[in-house]
Image: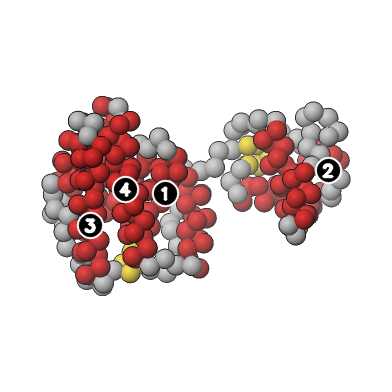
Amino acid sequence: MTSPSAPSRRSPARRRAVARGLSRPQAIAETLKDWIVEQDLAPGDRLPQEAQLITVLGASKGTVREALRVLETQGLIRTRTGPGGGAFITPVDGDHAALLLANLFFFERPELADLLQMRRALMPALAAALAQTLEPADIEALAGTAAPLANSKDPEARRAAALAFDEALAAGATNPLLRFACGFLARMLGELVDAPAAVPDAAGTGWPEALIAALRARDAEGAAAAIEDRLDREAAALTAAGAVVARRFLAARASR
């Protein structure tokens, strides 16, 4: 390295990237990612200015700018122009990650059975984990989120409310993988699944109360069971209605 605070044109990440056949901008982007790790940079920290990157990386202005665009596309940095501008580390937004993953599935579309299988595998584990980790205030907030399920008599509105409740459940997970996966599945089911006929509300009205009661009692098995019964009923209803995964993109959401 040319200095303790500058990335190196001879970084192992760059050599590995070249060996994998990546383009020069992609290889430089990998170098910068390695340097971010080495320097323990946090959101809000700024990368070296463009002129310094050109010098220490031995690359042209166009190549450095393209490498920064690679990192920006991946959601790792945001660039600002003008005085005090530059490239700044940013936490990867969950919506950005969900949109990128949904783009993959636009071209390699899962079947409804695939979504339901993943949901059935993960949601009971989520409910069981929440029974052990949620604070009382968080449980009461979830109870409030479940209110539209009791107040609406329209099956489609109740289905939308149930999936919104699933996203709220996922947001409470301490396991980041479970949080993202369960939230993503709820979005896929809510935005991409169409049915030629109305889907009856087969899950009934009692499951939110049963789940909330289990969460309040710290009953992991009871929470998982409440979710399992609901998911099985909903899966049967969606399948019977001929629901399918539509070929369209997830809609972007405003940053919170």
Secondary-structure class at tag 4: helix
| Image spot of residue 147 (x, y percent) | 19, 42
4 and 2 marks in contact (CB < 8 Å):
no
> Dot 1 surroundings within 10 Å: few (below 14), some, or many (20 or more)?
some
3 and 2 marks in contact (CB < 8 Å):
no
Would you say 218 lies left or right of 101 here?
left
**Mark 2 or mark 1: whose residue is earlier in sequence:** 2
Could you tell me which residue is drawn at 13 percent across and 53 percent down?
Answer: 204
Q: Which residue is mark 3?
A: 232
Image quarter of residue 35: top right
Secondary-structure class at tag 1: helix
- The alpha-carbon separation of the residues under discs 2 and 1 comes to 37 Å
Give the residue type at disc 1.
Ala
**Residue found at the very far front of the displayed protein:** 221
**Mark 3 or mark 2: whose residue is earlier in sequence:** 2
> Dot 4 surroundings within 10 Å: few (below 14), some, or many (20 or more)?
many
Q: Nearer the viewer, residue 247 or 123?
A: 123
1 and 4 marks in contact (CB < 8 Å):
no
**Mark 4 or mark 2: whose residue is earlier in sequence:** 2
Q: Which residue is mark 2?
A: 10
**Mark 3 or mark 4: whose residue is earlier in sequence:** 4
Secondary-structure class at tag 2: loop
- The alpha-carbon separation of the residues under discs 1 and 4 comes to 9 Å
Image quarter of residue 243: bottom left
Secondary-structure class at tag 3: helix
Image quarter of residue 256: top left
| 29 to 236, vertically: above or below | above
Q: Which residue is mark 1?
A: 181
Query: Does the image show residue 205?
Result: yes
Q: Which residue is mark 4?
A: 123
